């Protein structure tokens, strides 16, 4: 999650020819390629995925955001290289989309650079969707009614790829917030997150609820904002994570408590974040960033309320 509160490598080449292949007749070599190389490819692919998993967990469990900020670009390039060698890996495409989205939102302030990274994140997410189900290629550009219909047809096996698409899409909209056509896509991201809540609301510790809560607070109540709907989603996200996701409380304070001018709730949520132990497995970095944001929000509270 981003530092400002905006809710997962080494390039490994598969050999095109084995060193000892010239000792075999052409027919035998082709047979070996048919029998051996697919298995080798699977082994390389699994090793690549395992390496990506390990690096992703290492980043998630790092308590020094500055280290992640400095080292993150190298990992992004490593993922790019892995995908070059395994372009049909849904797992790698999902990881790349997620990391590009998170890194851009958390650490990149330059608007042009943020837009470029968000573009790449969304492209990877769309490619993952195409690999997951080729019939869904181009779904992002479908008419809204067709898009809604497709979302209603999704099942539990589709949650991971659509959550990745939704988060990357939301990051892309944020990076292109001056483009009214991009902002108009929010309704599609909302449809994705609503469906994920219906299928598996506990996915990613209830993070889809954080998106839905945020969407409900994007405009004031007088213009159609829904603070009580937002409150329900934020509280549900906190419940689903059993309080472990500190960013849920930060977003709740920033988006809801500020909207309704509830200083007591605002102070309580942020104080709880600062008092909590951020060292939750696979959430250390996110929680550390949440505490940084909580300190900043508390420091400016008197200026807001």
Image (spheres, rainbow, N blue to C red):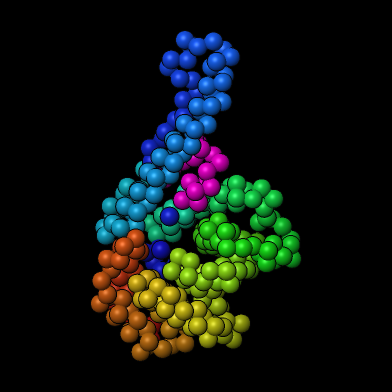
Magenta stretch: includes residue 64: no
Residue 290 spot, x, y in % from top left: 34, 69
Magenta stretch: includes residue 85: yes
Q: Residue at the location (51% across, 71% down)?
A: 201
Q: Residue at the location (50% across, 83% down)?
A: 232
Is residue 46 visible to us here? yes
Q: Nearer the viewer, residue 282 or 97?
A: 282
| The residue stretch that appears in magenta | 76-95
Q: Nearer the viewer, residue 265 or 29?
A: 29
Q: Residue at the location (53% across, 47% down)?
A: 90
Residue 155 spot, x, y in % from top left: 61, 63
30 sits left or right of 64 in the view: right
Is residue 119 visible to us here? no
Q: Nearer the viewer, residue 183 or 61?
A: 61
Q: Nearer the viewer, residue 47 or 71?
A: 47
17 sits left or right of 9 in the view: right
Residue 88 spot, x, y in % from top left: 56, 41
**Residue 2: quadrant of the picture:** bottom left
Above or below for 12 versus 153: above
Above or below for 265 versus 218: below
Tag count in the figure? Answer: 0
Q: Residue at the location (55% across, 56% down)?
A: 161
Question: Which quarter of the rendering shows the C terminus?
Answer: bottom left
């Amino acid at each position: 999650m981003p530092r400002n509160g905006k809710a997962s490598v080494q390039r490994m080449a598969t050999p095109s020819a084995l060193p000892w292949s010239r000792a075999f007749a052409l027919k035998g070599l082709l047979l070996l390629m048919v029998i051996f190389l697919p298995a080798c490819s699977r082994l390389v692919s699994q090793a690549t995925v395992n390496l990506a998993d390990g690096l992703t967990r290492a980043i998630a469990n790092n308590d020094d955001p500055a280290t992640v900020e400095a080292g993150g670009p190298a990992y992004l390039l490593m993922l790019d290289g892995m995908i070059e060698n395994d372009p049909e890996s849904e797992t790698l495409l999902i990881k790349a989309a997620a990391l590009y989205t998170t890194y851009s939102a958390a650490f990149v302030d330059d608007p042009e650079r943020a837009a470029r990274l968000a573009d790449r994140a969304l492209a990877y997410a769309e490619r993952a969707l195409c690999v997951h189900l080729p019939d869904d290629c181009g779904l992002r550009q479908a008419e809204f009614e067709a898009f809604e219909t497709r979302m209603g047809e999704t099942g539990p096996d589709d949650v991971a790829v659509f959550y990745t698409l939704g988060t990357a899409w939301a990051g892309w909209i944020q990076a292109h917030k001056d483009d009214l056509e991009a902002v108009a896509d929010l309704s599609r991201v909302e449809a994705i997150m609503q469906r994920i809540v219906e299928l598996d609301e506990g996915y990613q510790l209830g993070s889809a609820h954080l998106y839905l809560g945020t969407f409900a607070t994007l405009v004031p109540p007088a213009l159609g904002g829904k603070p009580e709907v937002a409150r329900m989603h934020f509280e549900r996200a906190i419940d689903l994570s059993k309080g472990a996701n500190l960013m849920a409380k930060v977003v709740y304070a920033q988006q809801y408590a500020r909207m309704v001018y509830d200083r007591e709730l605002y102070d309580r949520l942020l104080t709880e974040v600062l008092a909590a132990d951020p060292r939750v497995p696979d959430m250390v970095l996110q929680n550390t960033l949440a505490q940084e944001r909580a300190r900043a929000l508390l420091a400016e509270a008197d200026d807001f309320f």
